[in-house]
Amino acid sequence: MSKAIGVFRRLGLAALVAGGLAAPAWSQDFKVAMSSPPTSMDPHFQNITTNANVIEHMFEPLVMRSPDGKLAPGLAESWSLINNLTWEFKIRRGAKFSDGSLVTADDVIYSLDRPTTIKNSPASFTQYTKSIVGKKVIDANTVRLTTGAETPLLPDDLVSVIIVSKKATEGLASDDFANGKGMVGSGPYKFVRFLRDDRVELARSEHYNGPNKTPWATTTIRFIANPSTRLAALLAGDVQAIENVPTPDLGRVRNDANLSLITATSQRMVFMFADWRDKSPFVTDKNGAVLATSPLKDVRVRRALSMAINRDAIRDRVMEGLAETTENLIVPGSPGYVPSMVPPKYDPDAAKKLLAEAGFPNGFGLTVHGPNNRLVNDEKIAQTVAQMFTRIGVDTKVETMPMAVYAPRGAKYEFSVALIAWGGSVDLTSPMRALLACENPAKGMGVVNWAKYCNPKVDELLMKADSMDPLVRSRILREAAGIISKDVALIPLHFQVSAWAVKKGLTYKGRGDERTYAFDFKPM
C-alpha cells in the first residue's frame, strides 16, 4: 500500500496598505451557528457528529477526511503498511498541543487506549480501536500498530479517534472537560470557554503547525436549535454563517444578495430502526396496553412499515429536495453499495395485506421517537412517517426530544421504532459493525445497535470482509447488504443533503461528512 502524504494548505498573512497595517481578515472574530450542542466535551465519551463537530476544532485525529471524503493527513503526516498486520504512522514534525508541549508517540498510544476506560458511553469509540492488538513506539514521532487480523480500514477507523494530551487528561472524568480541564489539543484552536447548550468560545492556537490553519483570531460557535431562529441570527448579523439551512427558507437564502448558499450530498443515511426484542415498550394494542409479543419481530411487519413510507414525498415536500432516497446504507461507489437495491415501492394497500398475513389485520399501536435538533427536519420527518404508518392501520404517536436526551435513551434501548442517522462512512463495514453486528462490547461490535438486531450470517460476512483484497471485500459486503435489506434490519429513508448559508465575502466548501469547521470558512 502506498504511503499517504498530505499537502498542507497555507494561508497568507496580512498585507501592508498606505498609512499603516490593514486590519487583516485573519485577525477578526468569526461566529457560526450550529444546530445541535455537544453532549460532552470529552473527545472519547460519545461517538456522535455533534460532539466531533466542536471537538475537532481543538483536537486532531491521526487521519482526517477532505471535503470530498478522501483520507487526508491529520496529526499524522503520513502512514504506511509495513506488512498485512502492521501499520506505521508518522506524527507531524513539531506538532504541539495548545499548552506548547510537543505531541509524542506516547500521547497517541494513550489516546488509543483511553476509549476502553470510558464508562457508560452512549456510543463507544472502541469499535475503532478493538482491532489493534499491539502498539509500539518507534521514536517520539513514530507509532506502529499491529492488528489481530487484516484490517484494511484502520486508517479510516482512526479518523474517528481523537488524540489527547496524556499529561493534561490522565485521571480526569468526562464531566471535567466541560469546565476546561483536559482541553489541550493539537488543533487550530485552543479552548476558551464552554457554556452548555449556548456556545463554545475559541482562540487561534499559536502552536498549531498543521494543514487547517484558521484565518480567525477568535471564533464563537453558537448552538441554535430552532431553524428559523438560526437563520434570523444570520440575517441580523449575529453570526456570519449557519449550518442546516431551514428547507422552507432555501429560496429566500438563494435570492438574498447578501448571502450565499452552499450544498453537498452527505454520507449521512437517515433511517428508522424497529426493535427486534420479543416485547417492546411502545408497541401496544389499540387500547394502549403493551403487547406480550411484539409484531415488529415479524419481517412482514417491518416490510409493511417500509412500504408504507412515501420516500419521494418526504424528499420533495418535507426536505424541499435536500435528500436522496436510498435502500443502501452507504453512498454510491462505496464498497458494499449495490446499485440494484432500491427502496420498496410506496404501496399502502400491499402494506396492509402484509400486516394481515402477519396476524395484524387491524394493525396495532405504536409510538415513533426521534430527535428534534439533530437532523434536517427530523421532527417533521418523524411526524410524516407516523401519519403514513397510521394510514395502514398502525395507530402511531410521535415523541421527539433534544439529541442530548435522545441519545442516552436510545443507548438504553428505550424505543420501539425511532428515527436516527449514521454518517461519515464510505464503506459498509462501518455501519455494519456499529449498527447491525450482534452486540459484543468486548470486540467493539454493535455499540449503537439500538434495534437489538442479530444475524450470525451478517457477523460472519463482516469478519470475512477484513481482507486486503478490495475485490473480495466488495463481493462479501454486497452479499451482506442483500441480507440486511431482506431482513429489513433497518428502514433506510434517504441521504441528507447538507446546506450552509454564509454572508457574502466568505467562502466554504460543503463536506460529505457534514462537518462544519470554522477554520474552513475563508474571507474572499
Image: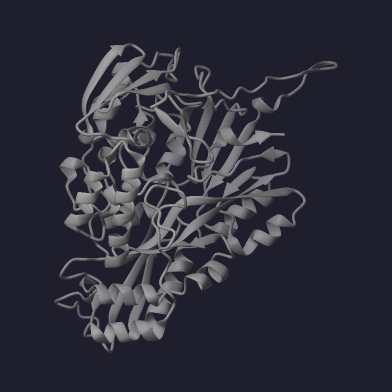
Left or right relative to 213: residue 394: left
The image shows residue 324, relative to residue 293, as above or below, that is above
Q: Which residue is more in the foreground, 319 or 1?
A: 1
Q: Residue at x 84, y 16 (%)?
A: 19
Residue 151, picture quadrant: top left
Q: Residue at x 39, y 54 (%)?
A: 403
Horizontal and vertical percent position of residue 249: 64, 61
Asked whether residue 91 is in view, the answer is yes
Residue at the bottom extreme, as displayed: 362
Horizontal and vertical percent position of residue 522: 65, 34
Horizontal and vertical percent position of residue 323: 53, 61
Residue 382, picture quadrant: bottom left
Q: Which residue is more in the foreground, 313 or 334?
A: 334
Q: Residue at x 27, y 64 (%)?
A: 415
Residue at the top extreme, as displayed: 139
Picture quarter with the C terminus: top right
Q: Which residue is more in the foreground, 295 or 369?
A: 295
The image shows residue 444, relative to residue 418, as above or below, that is above
